[in-house]
Image (cartoon, rainbow, N blue to C red):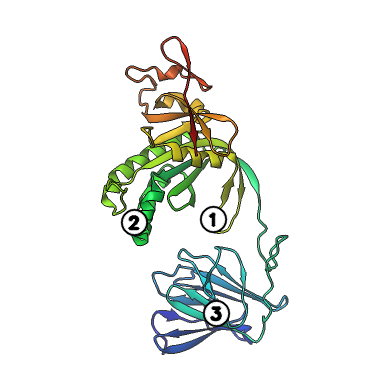
Amino acid sequence: MISPSIEVAGGQSGEPLGYLDFNDGGREHRVPIFDQMFVGRECAGISESRRLIIRDPEISRTHLEIRLDAVMDQAFVIDTSTNGTLVNGMRLERAVPRPIRPGDEIRIGDWLLTFRSQRFATAKGITAAGLSAPGLTRTRISQAAMVIVVGDIVNYSTISEVTDERVVAESLHTLWHEVGGVLHAHHGTLNHYAGDAILAIWEASRFPDAAERAIDFALAANRLVEDFAPKLPLRSPDGMPIRMGWGVVVGMVALAAMTRSVEAVIGDSTNVAFRLAGLAGRQGRAAVMVTSGVRRTVESRFTWGEGEKVELKGRREIETVFPVIDREASGDTTQPGRDTGSIPVVAEVEGDGITHPMPLHKVD
Protein backbone atom coordinates (compact mmCIF):
# COMPACT_ATOMS: atom_id res chain seq x y z
CA MET A 1 0.00 0.00 0.00
CA ILE A 2 1.34 3.41 -0.96
CA SER A 3 1.67 6.16 1.66
CA PRO A 4 -0.87 9.01 1.33
CA SER A 5 2.09 11.38 0.97
CA ILE A 6 3.00 9.76 -2.38
CA GLU A 7 1.18 9.70 -5.70
CA VAL A 8 3.01 7.65 -8.34
CA ALA A 9 2.82 7.85 -12.10
CA GLY A 10 0.65 5.46 -14.02
CA GLY A 11 -1.71 5.00 -16.90
CA GLN A 12 0.73 5.02 -19.84
CA SER A 13 1.32 1.94 -21.96
CA GLY A 14 4.59 0.86 -23.54
CA GLU A 15 8.01 -0.02 -22.22
CA PRO A 16 9.51 2.52 -19.78
CA LEU A 17 12.94 3.93 -20.63
CA GLY A 18 13.87 4.16 -16.97
CA TYR A 19 12.66 4.13 -13.37
CA LEU A 20 12.90 6.03 -10.12
CA ASP A 21 13.34 3.79 -7.08
CA PHE A 22 12.73 5.12 -3.59
CA ASN A 23 11.78 4.02 -0.09
CA ASP A 24 8.75 5.43 1.71
CA GLY A 25 8.66 4.40 5.36
CA GLY A 26 10.08 0.94 4.70
CA ARG A 27 8.10 0.35 1.50
CA GLU A 28 10.00 0.22 -1.78
CA HIS A 29 8.51 1.92 -4.83
CA ARG A 30 9.50 1.86 -8.49
CA VAL A 31 8.08 4.62 -10.70
CA PRO A 32 8.31 4.18 -14.49
CA ILE A 33 9.68 6.98 -16.69
CA PHE A 34 8.63 6.87 -20.34
CA ASP A 35 10.18 10.10 -21.65
CA GLN A 36 9.59 12.79 -19.00
CA MET A 37 8.99 12.73 -15.28
CA PHE A 38 8.15 15.71 -13.06
CA VAL A 39 8.61 15.41 -9.30
CA GLY A 40 7.05 17.82 -6.82
CA ARG A 41 4.30 18.26 -4.27
CA GLU A 42 1.72 19.38 -6.89
CA CYS A 43 3.01 19.24 -10.53
CA ALA A 44 -0.13 21.07 -11.64
CA GLY A 45 -1.23 20.58 -15.25
CA ILE A 46 0.99 17.53 -15.80
CA SER A 47 -0.55 14.20 -16.77
CA GLU A 48 -0.54 11.42 -14.17
CA SER A 49 1.79 9.28 -16.26
CA ARG A 50 4.49 11.97 -16.15
CA ARG A 51 4.45 13.02 -12.50
CA LEU A 52 5.48 11.81 -9.08
CA ILE A 53 3.74 13.69 -6.28
CA ILE A 54 5.50 13.86 -2.91
CA ARG A 55 3.44 15.85 -0.42
CA ASP A 56 6.26 17.35 1.60
CA PRO A 57 6.25 21.10 2.45
CA GLU A 58 10.02 21.32 1.86
CA ILE A 59 9.59 20.11 -1.73
CA SER A 60 8.58 22.64 -4.38
CA ARG A 61 5.32 22.45 -6.29
CA THR A 62 7.33 21.30 -9.30
CA HIS A 63 10.73 20.45 -7.85
CA LEU A 64 12.55 18.82 -10.75
CA GLU A 65 12.18 17.33 -14.19
CA ILE A 66 13.81 14.22 -15.64
CA ARG A 67 14.12 13.98 -19.43
CA LEU A 68 14.98 10.79 -21.31
CA ASP A 69 15.92 10.96 -25.01
CA ALA A 70 16.08 7.53 -26.60
CA VAL A 71 17.37 8.83 -29.94
CA MET A 72 20.29 10.76 -28.42
CA ASP A 73 20.72 8.15 -25.65
CA GLN A 74 20.83 10.88 -23.01
CA ALA A 75 19.17 11.36 -19.63
CA PHE A 76 18.97 14.67 -17.76
CA VAL A 77 17.66 16.02 -14.47
CA ILE A 78 16.72 19.71 -14.23
CA ASP A 79 16.26 21.43 -10.85
CA THR A 80 13.43 23.99 -10.73
CA SER A 81 13.07 24.16 -6.96
CA THR A 82 13.40 26.59 -4.08
CA ASN A 83 15.37 24.35 -1.72
CA GLY A 84 17.57 22.67 -4.31
CA THR A 85 18.38 19.19 -5.66
CA LEU A 86 21.47 17.05 -5.11
CA VAL A 87 22.82 14.41 -7.50
CA ASN A 88 25.31 12.05 -5.88
CA GLY A 89 25.77 14.62 -3.13
CA MET A 90 26.45 17.56 -5.49
CA ARG A 91 24.01 20.47 -5.53
CA LEU A 92 22.62 21.27 -8.98
CA GLU A 93 22.60 24.66 -10.61
CA ARG A 94 19.05 25.79 -10.98
CA ALA A 95 17.41 25.34 -14.41
CA VAL A 96 20.59 23.82 -15.89
CA PRO A 97 20.25 20.25 -17.28
CA ARG A 98 22.57 17.80 -15.52
CA PRO A 99 23.35 14.49 -17.31
CA ILE A 100 22.57 11.42 -15.21
CA ARG A 101 23.36 7.72 -15.52
CA PRO A 102 21.79 4.57 -14.09
CA GLY A 103 22.52 4.28 -10.40
CA ASP A 104 22.77 8.04 -9.80
CA GLU A 105 21.13 9.17 -6.56
CA ILE A 106 18.87 12.23 -6.60
CA ARG A 107 18.06 13.80 -3.22
CA ILE A 108 15.27 16.31 -2.65
CA GLY A 109 14.67 17.25 0.97
CA ASP A 110 14.71 14.00 2.97
CA TRP A 111 13.79 11.87 -0.05
CA LEU A 112 16.35 9.77 -1.94
CA LEU A 113 15.44 8.76 -5.50
CA THR A 114 17.66 6.36 -7.48
CA PHE A 115 17.62 6.47 -11.28
CA ARG A 116 17.51 3.02 -12.91
CA SER A 117 17.69 2.11 -16.60
CA GLN A 118 19.17 -0.38 -19.03
CA ARG A 119 20.17 2.57 -21.20
CA PHE A 120 21.84 5.99 -20.85
CA ALA A 121 25.08 4.53 -19.45
CA THR A 122 27.18 7.30 -21.00
CA ALA A 123 26.33 10.74 -19.64
CA LYS A 124 27.30 13.37 -22.20
CA GLY A 125 28.32 16.77 -20.97
CA ILE A 126 27.02 20.20 -21.87
CA THR A 127 29.36 22.11 -24.15
CA ALA A 128 30.12 25.82 -24.15
CA ALA A 129 28.89 26.10 -27.72
CA GLY A 130 25.42 24.96 -26.72
CA LEU A 131 23.45 22.56 -24.60
CA SER A 132 23.36 19.02 -25.96
CA ALA A 133 20.06 18.33 -24.21
CA PRO A 134 17.21 18.35 -26.74
CA GLY A 135 14.52 20.99 -26.86
CA LEU A 136 16.28 23.57 -24.68
CA THR A 137 15.79 27.29 -25.22
CA ARG A 138 18.76 29.26 -26.49
CA THR A 139 19.88 32.00 -24.11
CA ARG A 140 19.04 35.51 -25.32
CA ILE A 141 21.27 38.44 -24.38
CA SER A 142 19.79 41.92 -24.68
CA GLN A 143 20.45 45.47 -23.51
CA ALA A 144 18.10 47.79 -21.65
CA ALA A 145 18.08 50.99 -19.65
CA MET A 146 17.48 50.15 -16.01
CA VAL A 147 17.21 51.79 -12.64
CA ILE A 148 18.93 49.50 -10.14
CA VAL A 149 18.62 49.43 -6.36
CA VAL A 150 21.00 47.43 -4.19
CA GLY A 151 20.38 47.09 -0.47
CA ASP A 152 23.30 45.93 1.65
CA ILE A 153 23.50 45.04 5.36
CA VAL A 154 26.00 47.20 7.25
CA ASN A 155 28.93 45.24 8.77
CA TYR A 156 27.56 41.92 7.54
CA SER A 157 30.96 40.20 7.40
CA THR A 158 31.57 40.91 11.09
CA ILE A 159 28.00 39.96 12.01
CA SER A 160 28.18 36.61 10.19
CA GLU A 161 31.54 35.83 11.77
CA VAL A 162 30.14 35.98 15.32
CA THR A 163 26.59 34.71 14.67
CA ASP A 164 25.30 31.16 14.32
CA GLU A 165 24.69 30.31 10.65
CA ARG A 166 21.13 29.19 11.30
CA VAL A 167 20.28 32.48 13.01
CA VAL A 168 21.72 34.35 10.02
CA ALA A 169 19.82 32.24 7.49
CA GLU A 170 16.47 32.41 9.30
CA SER A 171 16.76 36.15 9.94
CA LEU A 172 17.65 36.93 6.33
CA HIS A 173 14.85 34.72 5.05
CA THR A 174 12.36 36.62 7.21
CA LEU A 175 13.82 40.03 6.36
CA TRP A 176 13.93 39.48 2.59
CA HIS A 177 10.34 38.24 2.67
CA GLU A 178 9.23 41.50 4.28
CA VAL A 179 11.33 43.63 1.93
CA GLY A 180 9.90 41.70 -1.01
CA GLY A 181 6.42 42.90 -0.10
CA VAL A 182 7.61 46.51 -0.21
CA LEU A 183 9.28 45.89 -3.57
CA HIS A 184 6.09 44.44 -5.01
CA ALA A 185 4.13 47.48 -3.85
CA HIS A 186 6.55 49.71 -5.79
CA HIS A 187 6.34 47.54 -8.94
CA GLY A 188 10.00 46.56 -8.85
CA THR A 189 11.45 43.23 -9.92
CA LEU A 190 13.63 41.21 -7.58
CA ASN A 191 16.64 40.17 -9.60
CA HIS A 192 19.04 38.68 -7.10
CA TYR A 193 19.82 37.87 -3.50
CA ALA A 194 23.52 37.84 -2.64
CA GLY A 195 23.47 36.74 0.98
CA ASP A 196 23.56 40.11 2.71
CA ALA A 197 22.39 42.09 -0.33
CA ILE A 198 19.30 42.42 -2.49
CA LEU A 199 19.22 43.69 -6.09
CA ALA A 200 16.02 45.08 -7.61
CA ILE A 201 15.37 46.62 -11.02
CA TRP A 202 12.91 48.85 -12.87
CA GLU A 203 12.93 48.95 -16.67
CA ALA A 204 12.99 52.53 -17.91
CA SER A 205 11.08 51.61 -21.07
CA ARG A 206 8.17 50.34 -18.98
CA PHE A 207 8.21 52.92 -16.19
CA PRO A 208 8.95 56.53 -17.21
CA ASP A 209 9.12 57.31 -13.48
CA ALA A 210 11.45 54.37 -12.76
CA ALA A 211 13.96 56.43 -10.77
CA GLU A 212 11.22 57.89 -8.59
CA ARG A 213 9.76 54.45 -7.92
CA ALA A 214 13.21 53.09 -7.09
CA ILE A 215 14.01 55.82 -4.57
CA ASP A 216 10.56 55.54 -3.00
CA PHE A 217 11.20 51.81 -2.61
CA ALA A 218 14.63 52.33 -1.05
CA LEU A 219 13.23 54.85 1.46
CA ALA A 220 10.26 52.62 2.32
CA ALA A 221 12.41 49.50 2.57
CA ASN A 222 14.84 51.27 4.85
CA ARG A 223 11.99 52.38 7.12
CA LEU A 224 10.77 48.80 7.22
CA VAL A 225 14.24 47.55 8.21
CA GLU A 226 14.44 50.16 10.97
CA ASP A 227 11.07 49.02 12.34
CA PHE A 228 11.50 45.29 11.74
CA ALA A 229 15.18 44.68 12.60
CA PRO A 230 14.67 44.95 16.40
CA LYS A 231 12.39 41.89 16.14
CA LEU A 232 15.12 39.76 14.53
CA PRO A 233 17.68 37.72 16.50
CA LEU A 234 20.35 38.87 14.02
CA ARG A 235 22.33 41.67 15.66
CA SER A 236 25.44 43.76 15.17
CA PRO A 237 28.40 42.82 17.40
CA ASP A 238 27.47 45.70 19.75
CA GLY A 239 23.99 44.19 20.22
CA MET A 240 22.21 46.80 18.14
CA PRO A 241 19.67 45.83 15.42
CA ILE A 242 21.03 45.47 11.89
CA ARG A 243 21.02 48.43 9.51
CA MET A 244 21.14 48.65 5.73
CA GLY A 245 22.53 50.96 3.08
CA TRP A 246 20.82 51.49 -0.29
CA GLY A 247 22.36 52.52 -3.61
CA VAL A 248 20.29 53.73 -6.57
CA VAL A 249 21.83 53.83 -10.06
CA VAL A 250 20.57 54.33 -13.61
CA GLY A 251 22.27 53.06 -16.76
CA MET A 252 22.42 50.56 -19.62
CA VAL A 253 22.89 46.92 -18.68
CA ALA A 254 23.11 43.59 -20.47
CA LEU A 255 20.44 41.02 -19.59
CA ALA A 256 21.11 37.31 -19.80
CA ALA A 257 19.70 34.18 -18.20
CA MET A 258 22.28 32.75 -15.81
CA THR A 259 22.39 29.79 -13.46
CA ARG A 260 20.45 30.17 -10.19
CA SER A 261 19.14 33.56 -11.27
CA VAL A 262 16.01 34.73 -13.00
CA GLU A 263 18.08 37.02 -15.16
CA ALA A 264 21.54 38.43 -14.68
CA VAL A 265 21.94 42.21 -14.89
CA ILE A 266 25.47 42.77 -16.10
CA GLY A 267 27.40 46.00 -16.54
CA ASP A 268 29.13 48.94 -14.92
CA SER A 269 25.86 50.22 -13.46
CA THR A 270 25.46 47.02 -11.43
CA ASN A 271 28.97 47.39 -10.05
CA VAL A 272 28.31 51.02 -9.10
CA ALA A 273 25.04 50.07 -7.36
CA PHE A 274 26.77 47.50 -5.16
CA ARG A 275 29.63 49.89 -4.34
CA LEU A 276 27.22 52.71 -3.55
CA ALA A 277 25.14 50.48 -1.28
CA GLY A 278 28.35 49.63 0.55
CA LEU A 279 28.91 53.36 1.11
CA ALA A 280 25.38 54.28 2.24
CA GLY A 281 24.54 54.12 5.92
CA ARG A 282 28.21 54.17 6.91
CA GLN A 283 30.31 56.86 8.60
CA GLY A 284 27.33 59.12 9.22
CA ARG A 285 26.00 58.98 5.67
CA ALA A 286 22.32 58.73 4.82
CA ALA A 287 20.92 55.25 4.31
CA VAL A 288 19.89 55.96 0.68
CA MET A 289 22.47 57.28 -1.80
CA VAL A 290 22.03 57.94 -5.53
CA THR A 291 24.25 58.85 -8.44
CA SER A 292 24.08 62.26 -10.09
CA GLY A 293 22.30 60.71 -13.07
CA VAL A 294 19.47 59.52 -10.87
CA ARG A 295 19.23 62.80 -8.95
CA ARG A 296 19.07 64.79 -12.17
CA THR A 297 15.85 63.03 -13.25
CA VAL A 298 13.98 63.40 -9.95
CA GLU A 299 15.59 66.45 -8.35
CA SER A 300 12.34 68.25 -7.47
CA ARG A 301 10.70 65.15 -6.00
CA PHE A 302 12.98 64.59 -3.00
CA THR A 303 14.90 66.38 -0.29
CA TRP A 304 18.65 66.03 -0.78
CA GLY A 305 21.73 66.16 1.37
CA GLU A 306 25.09 67.53 0.34
CA GLY A 307 26.82 65.97 -2.64
CA GLU A 308 30.03 63.99 -2.28
CA LYS A 309 32.74 62.90 -4.70
CA VAL A 310 33.75 59.25 -4.27
CA GLU A 311 36.19 56.91 -5.93
CA LEU A 312 34.53 53.53 -6.40
CA LYS A 313 36.62 50.39 -6.57
CA GLY A 314 36.91 49.08 -10.12
CA ARG A 315 36.18 52.43 -11.80
CA ARG A 316 38.53 55.09 -13.12
CA GLU A 317 36.07 57.97 -13.01
CA ILE A 318 35.19 59.91 -9.89
CA GLU A 319 31.47 59.53 -9.11
CA THR A 320 29.36 62.29 -7.58
CA VAL A 321 26.74 60.85 -5.25
CA PHE A 322 23.93 62.40 -3.22
CA PRO A 323 22.09 61.32 -0.07
CA VAL A 324 18.30 61.20 -0.21
CA ILE A 325 16.76 62.61 2.94
CA ASP A 326 13.06 62.06 2.19
CA ARG A 327 10.26 62.51 -0.31
CA GLU A 328 9.61 66.22 -0.99
CA ALA A 329 5.84 66.55 -0.70
CA SER A 330 5.73 70.23 -1.69
CA GLY A 331 8.18 69.95 -4.57
CA ASP A 332 10.53 72.40 -2.81
CA THR A 333 14.00 70.88 -2.38
CA THR A 334 15.16 73.47 0.16
CA GLN A 335 16.10 72.11 3.57
CA PRO A 336 16.22 74.39 6.63
CA GLY A 337 19.58 76.14 6.58
CA ARG A 338 20.68 74.59 3.27
CA ASP A 339 19.79 75.28 -0.33
CA THR A 340 20.53 71.88 -1.83
CA GLY A 341 18.67 72.80 -5.00
CA SER A 342 21.76 74.75 -6.08
CA ILE A 343 24.06 71.71 -5.92
CA PRO A 344 25.26 70.97 -9.44
CA VAL A 345 25.59 67.43 -10.69
CA VAL A 346 29.26 67.96 -11.50
CA ALA A 347 32.25 67.99 -9.19
CA GLU A 348 31.63 71.13 -7.14
CA VAL A 349 29.16 72.34 -4.55
CA GLU A 350 28.11 75.94 -4.10
CA GLY A 351 27.23 77.15 -0.61
CA ASP A 352 28.40 80.55 0.64
CA GLY A 353 29.01 82.20 -2.72
CA ILE A 354 32.47 80.64 -3.02
CA THR A 355 32.92 77.47 -5.02
CA HIS A 356 34.44 74.69 -2.89
CA PRO A 357 35.66 71.32 -4.19
CA MET A 358 33.91 68.42 -2.50
CA PRO A 359 36.09 66.02 -0.48
CA LEU A 360 37.20 62.87 -2.27
CA HIS A 361 36.54 59.53 -0.58
CA LYS A 362 37.70 56.09 -1.72
CA VAL A 363 35.13 53.33 -1.49
CA ASP A 364 36.14 49.69 -1.58
Observer-nearest residue: 320 or 282? Answer: 282
Is 67 drawn above or below residue 173 in the view shown? below
Q: Is residue 176 above or below residue 246?
A: below
Mark identifier at residue 352: none
The N terminus - image quarter: bottom left
Cα gap from disc 3 to disc 2, whole angstroms: 47 Å
Foreground residue, 289 or 166? 166
Looking at the image, which is closer to me, 122 or 308?
308
What residue does disc 2 label? Answer: 163
Picture coordinates of residue 347 (x, y %)?
52, 22
Q: Look at the numbered disc 1 and give the secondary structure of its residue.
A: loop
Q: Nearer the viewer, mark 2 or mark 1?
A: 2
Q: Which circle, 1 or 3, is nearer the viewer?
A: 1
Label 2 sits on a secondary structure element that is loop
Q: Which mark is residue 49?
A: 3
**In contact (CB < 8 Å): disc 3 and disc 2:** no
Amino acid bearing label 3: Ser
Rendered location of residue 296, percent (x, y)? 51, 25
* Mark found first going from the N terminus, 3 or 2: 3
Residue position marked by numbered label 1 in the rendering: 261
Callout 3 crowding tier (Cα within 10 Å): few <14, some 14–19, many ≥20: some
Amino acid of disc 1:
Ser
Residue at 40 percent of width and 25 percent of height: 305
Among the two numbered marks 1 and 3 on one chain, the one whose residue lies closer to the N terminus = 3
Q: Nearer the viewer, mark 3 or mark 2?
A: 2
Against 118, is 167 above or below? above
Contact, mark 2 vs mark 1 (Cβ under 8 Å): no
Residue 180 appearing in the image: no
Q: Residues within 10 Å of mark 1 (few under 14, many from 20)?
A: some
Question: Could you tell me how far apart the alpha carbons at marks 1 and 3 are, in whole angstroms?
Answer: 30 Å
Q: How many marks?
A: 3
Of label 2 and label 1, which has the lower sequence position?
2
